Image (cartoon, grey):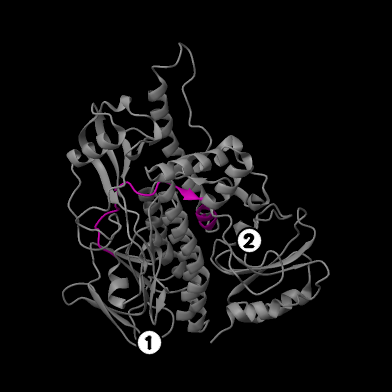
Amino acid sequence: MTDGKNEGTDYGADYDVVVAGGGPVGLFLACELRLGGAGVLVVERLAEVDETIKAGGINTAGAVALYRRGMLPELAAAWERNLWRMRAFIGERSAGERSAGAPRATPPKFAGHFAGIMMRGDLFDDSDPAFADIGPADGVGLGVPQAELERILAARAERLGVEVRRGVELTGFDADGEGVSVHLGGDNTVRTGWLVGCDGGRSTVRKLAGFDFPGTDPEITGYQAVVEMTGGERLGAGWNTTDVGTYVNGPFPGRILTVEFDGPPADLPHARLRSRGGTPIAPITAEELQASLRRVSGVDEVTIHEVHSSTRFTDNARQATGYRKGRVLLAGDAAHVHSPFGGQGLNLGLGDAMNLGWKLAAVVRGLAPASLLDSYTAERHPIGAWVLDWTRAQIAVMRPDRHARALRRVVTGLALTTSGTTYLVKQISGVWQHYDLPGEHALTGQSTPDLELSDGTRLGDHLHGGRALLLDLADDPKLRARAEEYADRVDVLTAACPGRPELTALLVRPDGFVAWAADKGDEGGSGLGDALSRWFVAV
């Protein structure tokens, strides 16, 4: 890798790609672009990592994506640090109830939640085929706070040679057929081949580019905060439903969340208020949080003395009709906004970045036509639409009216069954996600199984460099010969997989999804040539 300047197509630009927004999605996208050989500049309005409490976990789909880039050890260490905070909180809550000599409480096995209805880990059937061959990133996910993930990705971006300018805000841009002039305030303008908006729910890039952004209006005001308070022992631990709304206490000391069905905040009625971009909003006071917590919980004795971190949010649910307009693209919250329930937003954005990064890098280097980018919207838009509906459904179950409460009791009953819990966990974890790709094999379009190979490695170990991989499991020279002309884009690995004797070959895209697969009886790789030319043909 070089210093991150333009090293692809020579069109007089300063950078191949400018990424607006240096949160986890923007940083992960920048890393993916650098792996593909693109020169990248990230501009971020905030001067430091945003420590505001936001997403608290990475689901299975997100963890698998990061594992395929060799990041699992760092994430596991961060998860372990977070577990200690959770253990301390549960231990403090139970201290007065434990008999002398009884062990301290530890967090129960947690499989996620739907509208605050907890999925019990002991009811989750992890032998379900959807969870087969996930590999070291198995389970439902990792409890890694968003700020911690951002720091991990920022360090990775620096190692890869991504240029990140903090305290710099995109103020406008002019796009033409050859590239984009990006204005960064004052007389500071940089020229780039492509611009990607990862600048949050109130995206400046999306607004200036004129993307359509239809959806449904919000009906809640939500707060999430870390505070110092007294009287908290009167609050129920975890998720609590009352006649007024919903509140959460935990899973670590001082973390609270409230939801009231009184419409959105008056100052920003149609915005997700915790986004990175846009006009700064009024700070949240201790009095404002305390009033909401008292209203929802009914506990008047609770008093908030200090606010360490806080955010407002709504259930505004909107999605861009397309993720590309010429040389401008969107990813993450810039492309879709929704309520935070179920922890889908961060993971959805990571998937966007993984899908877009290798494709855009191939285009800017002249290794693929710009039409390859059409597959980005085609593949990611349906998953985004599903997430929006998933969060809308949770709002319906959380409403305080009698019809919604009746529905909640029905869903709770289903969640107390093994089949119901397993179904919900599959949705929460993202293991259901796939793309509608050409090909008849059952694995085509699926996230690749993390096969254990005879040399002691796993398939994911061979995807760290962000290149495509042809895995030859039958030692077939005809198969390998078909991939020779793509040697600058596709690695070839010959190995054996005792656990899947019927499988003879896989073509895995850089994002870890199967582009083509073959079983015994398909000697010579029928269909492999079409798959290679579809995804890796040069301009």
Callout in the foreground (2, 1): 2
Is 332 part of what is drawn in magenta?
A: no
Quadrant holding the N terminus: bottom left
For this view, does 92 lie left or right of residue 534? left
Query: Mark 2 packing: few (<14 Cα in 10 Å), some, or many (20+)?
Result: many
Q: Quadrant of residue 230?
A: top left
Residue 113 horizontal/vertical position (percent): 48, 43
Reading the image, the residue beneath label 2 is 448
Q: What range is drawn magenta here?
A: 44-66
Is 285 placed above or below 43 here? Answer: above
- Cα separation, mark 2 vs mark 1, equals 36 Å
What is the tally of numbered marks visible in this picture?
2
The residue nearer to you, when weighing 268 against 61, is 268
Question: Residue lying farthest front?
Answer: 402
Query: Mark 1 packing: few (<14 Cα in 10 Å), some, or many (20+)?
Result: some
The residue nearer to you, when weighing 516 against 152, is 516
Is 368 placed above or below 304 here? Answer: below
Is 62 part of what is drawn in magenta?
A: yes
The residue nearer to you, when weighing 111 against 53, is 111
Question: Which residue is depicted at the point 38% across and 43% down?
Answer: 401
The residue nearer to you, when weighing 312 against 53, is 312
Q: Quadrant of residue 514?
A: bottom right
Q: Is residue 323 visible?
A: yes
Three-letter residue code for mark 1: Tyr
For this view, does 306 lie left or right of residue 331? left
Reading the image, the residue beneath label 1 is 11
Residue 535 horizontal/vertical position (percent): 59, 77
Three-letter residue code for mark 2: Thr
Q: Is residue 227 visible?
A: no
Label located before the other in sequence (2 or 1): 1
Q: Quadrant of residue 353?
A: bottom left
Residue 260 horizontal/vertical position (percent): 30, 44
